[in-house]
Image (cartoon, rainbow, N blue to C red):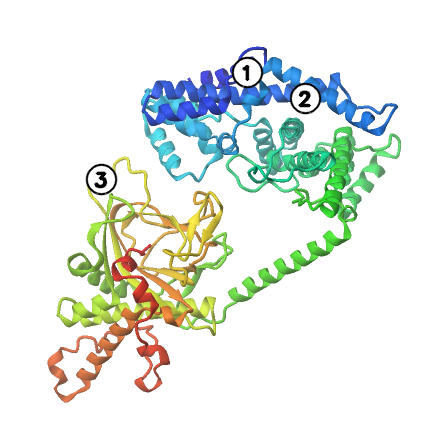
Amino acid sequence: MASLLCLSLLAAAAAATSPGRLVPFDLLYADGVRAYLARDWARAAELLQRALHSYAGLRAARRACRAACAREEPFSGGPGRWEAALLGPVLQRAGCLQRCLGRRLRPAPSAHRASRAVRRDFDRREPYNYLQVAFFQLKKLDQAVSAAHTFFVANPQHLQMREDIEKYRRMSGVKSDSFQDLEATPHWEAYETGVQHYDADEYLQAVARLEESLSEALSALEECRALCEGPWEDEEEEEEEKVQPGLYEAIAAHYIQVLKCRQQCVLEIATKPGRISATEDFIPSHLDLLQFAYSQVGNQTLAAECAASYLLFYPKDEPMLEKMKQYRAELGEDPAVMARQSIQHYVQRSLMEKKLIYYAVEHLGETFNDPDLWTPDELIPENLKEKYREDQEKQKQETLDVKEREKRGPLPFEGIAVTMDSQQMNGTQRVVFDRVLTESECKDLLRLTKAAGEAGDGYRARRSPHTPHERFEGLTVLKAVQLAQNGDVEWRDAKLLLQASEKSRKIIESYFTPGKKLHFSFTHLVCRRAVDGEQEGRMDLSHPVHADNCLLDPEGQECWKEPPAYVYRDYSGILYLNDDFQGGGLFFTEMDTVTVTAEVRPKCGRLVAFSSGKENPHGVWAVSRGRRCAIALWYTHSQEHAEQERVKAEELMEQRAVEQDQPDGDKHQGTDRSSRSSSEPRAPSRATKPADWRQKPGLDRKQHPKVLRARDEF
């Protein structure tokens, strides 16, 4: 069934390029989504498939017409005024395109200009997301699996689709060959297979697949470039009163837009579906691999040809120059070793376009992110080189600052290990420490969590605000001390909560901000418990992806530091107490909230710490079995936002210590005298207490009532 769907898509795309009515894909897509929301699965599947057919047909028609008109109306110089010589052929080409597209696209071509949002959905393969649900509801499993797999290939960190794919794999009626990418690009399959053969020293097979990949990649590049010659895309919405550019400015602006689009095509073909970043030097790397592989199979002529082609990109590459000397010595000067014509054309055309773009950047105020590492330095204008050097120096300094911050001295406690740093976690300002607590200390704190379900703060064993499939139990430090006062929990356990959180603060402060005081913003001992009987088919998270001091906007790729976010928070931490549960791991993502960059598995004594800003979006996987407990910690450099409940809790703890030191203090069952953690830092004496020890309740308490603060747990 999957192959039938794939064939139907290809057949429809081919048929759509022949004369006949082609319904605009955005209209079909909108109708399909409406049918989906109305749960009309058959209608939704039909319309969504037709939208995909129309989209493929539109792209095919544009490619075919641009290629045909390039042959029928070629540009050439001619007599007469330069406007006629230049713009005459342009007008003829435009007329050819209108006629060609008019024949292939009915209604008129202008009806097929979809909004940017709809085009983005098709680029992200969003219709397949709807299709897989529609096919599933129609009990067409093979087609549902193919649609799901096609979407998942381009969106591998999509959390819900990951769950769906795993469910499909467990279904008995699903065939393994149904998991196929209906939008597969031929050059990527050939490239990855070729690299695998290359790494396995299977050079004969490697050259065959790498040559196939290079050929397909260059073809894909031409198709991408043809699609760049589309309508003018204004970066901002048109306003009625907006001053329109003159003739030459408008022509220049649109032409530069087309050139920049063409330059970016190399990134499009070099980016594997589902990846964010392109493979660097995608075309040159083919030639580098091929020259070595050909030399290993004894074909020095083709090896030299690939080396000469590579040198068009990097003419001063010393290792390759040495290789060329070697090949020339082996082959002799006759016949002369020449670079491939296709690569010569590629490089010459790209350099011509770059030269025009950089002129526009220098004189017309354009911007350009050059996608190539091989662009010659002399092509870049001097003023841009200076700005580039300044940007590079600034970036270098920022990198050095980060490295300097992460070159930490000894941690303030012995036995603690840095398990993962920022580099290992694919981010910045992230770290994982182990052995912060002992097993016995974890058990004591877990004993304290039992009181949370009966008399705790925050959630009090209520349903989580983030998911109906879990219950939360929480205690603040003040509530723990008050429970100890009432005899509901042991004093030593409440004291250990204060000690463990203070120990974490000292570790995080010494690692991230040595010499700069971190104050507690909020401390919460919290447990998440999976609700029995409500885990089947669960698709959600224990805590959705968010940032701790700003409001995350994944669509706009921004994080807004404004209320109700806790904008004053600077660092966050989680000190785990157990691992006898299923799920519940912490994960970090990119700003898009779906691309997972790092994961942390909880266990007793593990402390994960990170800066609270937009650089560290994070969430928590669903707890599907058992009970996950941890101390959630937030810190601030702002003294006025220091946690007032903690100040009160420490005062009550000191008051108890004073009472125990009095002659009649024996009546108070001093259970905490021997309970100091083996790694506990010394508490300051009353005489050396910091100035902020007894500070008054500040803005934090006024703006953030306790019930809201408790809900801010991870």
What residue would you read off at disc 1? Answer: 107
What residue would you read off at disc 2? Answer: 66
Cβ atoms at labels 3 and 1 below 8 Å apart: no
**In-front residue for pair 38/336:** 38
**In-front residue for pair 298/705:** 705
Residue at disc 2, secondary structure = helix
Quarter of the image where one finds residue 258: top right
Cβ atoms at labels 2 and 1 below 8 Å apart: no
Measuring from the top left, give residue 119's x and y in whole percent. 52, 30
Query: Which mark is on residue 346?
Result: none
Measuring from the top left, give residue 510's x and y in whole percent. 44, 70
In the displayed structure, would residue 345 be above or below residue 623? above
Query: Which mark is on residue 534?
Result: 3
Single out the mark in the foreground, 3 or 1.
1
Disc 3 residue type?
A: Glu
**In-front residue for pair 47/502:** 47
CA–CA distance in space, label 3 to label 1: 51 Å
**Neighbours of disc 3 within 10 Å: few (<14), some (14-19), many (20+):** few
Quarter of the image where one finds residue 215: top right
**In-front residue for pair 303/258:** 258
CA–CA distance in space, label 3 to label 2: 56 Å
